[in-house]
Amino acid sequence: MNVIRFADLVAQGQVAGQRVFIRADLNVPLDDAGRITEDTRIRASVPCIEMALQAGAAVMVTSHLGRPTEGAFKPEDSLAPVAARLSELLGREVKLVVNWVDGVDVAPGQVVLLENCRVNVGEKKNKPELAQKMAALCDIYVNDAFGTAHRAEGTTYGIAEYAKVACAGPLLAAEIDAITQALANPKRPLIAIVAGSKVSTKLTILQSLSSKVDGLIVGGGIANTFLLAAGQKIGKSLAEPDLVGEATAVIAAMKARGAEVPIPVDVVCAKTFAADAPTTVKDASEVADDDLILDIGPKTAAILADKLKAAGTIVWNGPVGVFEFDAFAHGTETIARAIAQSPAFSIAGGGDTLAAIAKYGIEQDVGYISTGGGAFLEVLEGKTLPAFEILAKRAAG
């Protein structure tokens, strides 16, 4: 995908003295006292801001925070805690600017944070009047917020239509490169892991990937539905019997291409859903009527690990068992360690996946960790994200 990259504009000397508007993703969790509890997104935004400052730009940064009501600002909607943390990380004052749509006072070498953009009337529905006003604030618009790339809003799409220059920041550019490497031009075999509680929430992803991948590993409640499709009993495990037909169709589509959906050969069961529930490893054909399947078994985990170690590219979304309970985490840990040891290029995304990566300390061994959540899932569905679309359109002139 061809987009203008902010790093290239900096390298070409086109940023000095320019007014740069950065749409970052600073939507961090806050506790009841308004303190930031986890600042990964803020830290991830710093390289783009520093790049602009070092190039001599007048820098404006904005983001949404939470779900404010447009036109009705409340204190809990404020980016004030983010401004304080950014000041610490950048080692300079980051002034918070309110009511900024009609004009911003910022000089080259300075950075200001523009208050919660979703408070502005017209942001969510991408009203042209708002987009044109925001575009008039800057010479260069930079989208560095992959987490919002699946939304066509004022600060993610509209401003890019009207700004003199619209480009991708380093975070967004890295996501585009990783996604292209994993899905558009993958080294094969391409193996995807799609796990989660429900087939219904990831059915379009499964259908989209079934035409692209060489192996489709399913886990969690999704795997239980596929076990039903393969004619196995699953006891009282979480599943969606009404989607067995769709699961069967995915298996058939893969088989027709010479690809496969490996069905678990053994599983870890318990009688109750609890961290301290006694566990039993059973062949998939021996699940009792009162069993809950809560993880893949060791034989299945070993088979899947071998496939992952032989892969050329791995896409990972979702743990394969109830990994929050240690008794049912072995499958996910085996998968995680196999991905870490594999020479394949790997891209991982989704909140539970990131939690598993952190739990097993393999951050340095995954090729690319996407912070996008919903945007990452929409890419896996085969959708073109609005933010990518408008940046590519602007790059094409």
Image: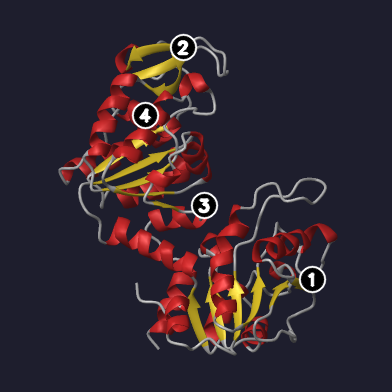
Looking at numbered disc 2 in the image, what kind of residue is underneath it?
A: Thr
Q: Which residue is mark 2?
A: 279
Say if 118 sits above or below 318 in the image. below
Looking at numbered disc 3 in the image, what kind of residue is underneath it?
A: Gly
Q: Which residue is mark 4?
A: 334
**Mark 3 or mark 4, earlier in chain:** 4
**Mark 2 or mark 1, earlier in chain:** 1
Q: Viewer-nearest of labels 2 and 1?
A: 2
Q: Viewer-nearest of labels 3 and 1?
A: 3
Marking on residue 28: none
Residue 215 relative to residue 157: left or right = left
Q: Position of residue 54 (x, y in %)?
A: 56, 78
Residue toward you, 115 or 56: 56
Q: Viewer-nearest of labels 3 and 4?
A: 4
Q: Which residue is mark 3?
A: 373
Looking at numbered disc 1 in the image, what kind of residue is underneath it?
A: Gly
Residue 158 relative to residue 91: left or right = left
Helix, strand or loop at mark 3:
loop
